[in-house]
Amino acid sequence: MSETLSRRAVLTGAVRGTLPEEETFDVVVVGSGAAGLAAALEARKAGAEVIVLEKMGSIGGNSVISQGLAAVPGTPQQSEAGIGDNPELMFNDLMKVTKISHPHRIALLTENALATWQWTIDELGVHWSRGVEYDYGHSVRRCVALANQGEGLMTPLAERVSALGVSVRLNTRVTGFLTDDTGRVTGVTALVTDAAGLHPVTIRSWRLPEALARTSRCGRCRAGGSAPASARQPSPEARAK
């Protein structure tokens, strides 16, 4: 069994662990940034046995070194500043500046931004600044900042994941997907790096608890361990053809 996450692990990459040649979990999460750990958290809360695989020697990905800005329409900070905003306005702003996009995914982002932002407060106790800022492409001030940049989100997120008993493996680079006859993903292959060199491993996703399907709110955990290999959703234009 691997060591679990800790506050120190986020900052220094203190977690180390190796994998047997093959293991099985309900849900396999690739990457330990904000999206990966949030997905792992929600899956674990739904009753799944979860493993997070991280190719680097420390957790956090780009999230832990980010500036910690988030564009969120309708925050209390905007209300206090007298700024009117809504998901539709944010959607229109993003559509104006994007070069290649999927409108339905941008809509998913804008419609769930406020609820997800509130989730970081209610679930993780994250602290955000009182003000709102402009960022490129936004017609109003809607960007809120983490009190301690990326660490301000990743540290409490890591602590919450650790408290729930999620397994995390570092120095484990995913190299491929395992699929069944229907094309559904049933696991991954990976290479683990340790003092002795590189070791190939297999991590299988054994089942997707029924309750996990109900965690797909606010975009925090939209795919489980048994997601189809072709899980990319077609755009509305493609579906219309």
Image (cartoon, grey):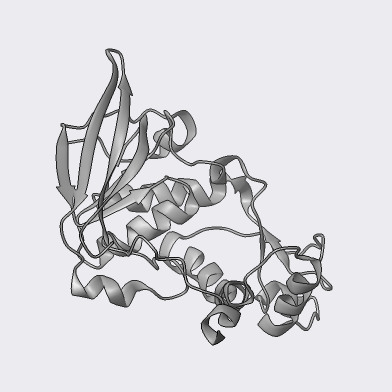
- The answer to whether residue 143 is left or right of residue 178 is right
Q: Residue at x 23, y 33 (%)?
A: 201
Q: Position of residue 56 (x, y in %)?
A: 44, 31
Residue lying furthest bottom: 240
Q: Residue at x 19, y 55 (%)?
A: 49
Q: Position of residue 147 (x, y in %)?
A: 63, 52
Q: Quadrant of residue 164?
A: bottom left
Q: Residue at x 67, y 47 (%)?
A: 67
Q: Is residue 55 above or below residue 47?
A: above
Q: In the picture, which quadrant includes the N terminus?
A: top left
Q: Position of residue 211 (x, y in %)?
A: 22, 74
Q: In the picture, which quadrant includes the C terminus?
A: bottom right
Residue lying furthest front: 241
Q: Quadrant of residue 229?
A: bottom left
Q: Is residue 15 above or below residue 236?
A: above
Q: Residue at x 72, y 64 (%)?
A: 143
- Along the line of sight, the residue nearer the viewer: 148 or 21: 21
Q: Position of residue 159 (x, y in %)?
A: 37, 48
Residue lying furthest top: 196
Number of callouts in the render?
0
Q: Quadrant of residue 202?
A: top left
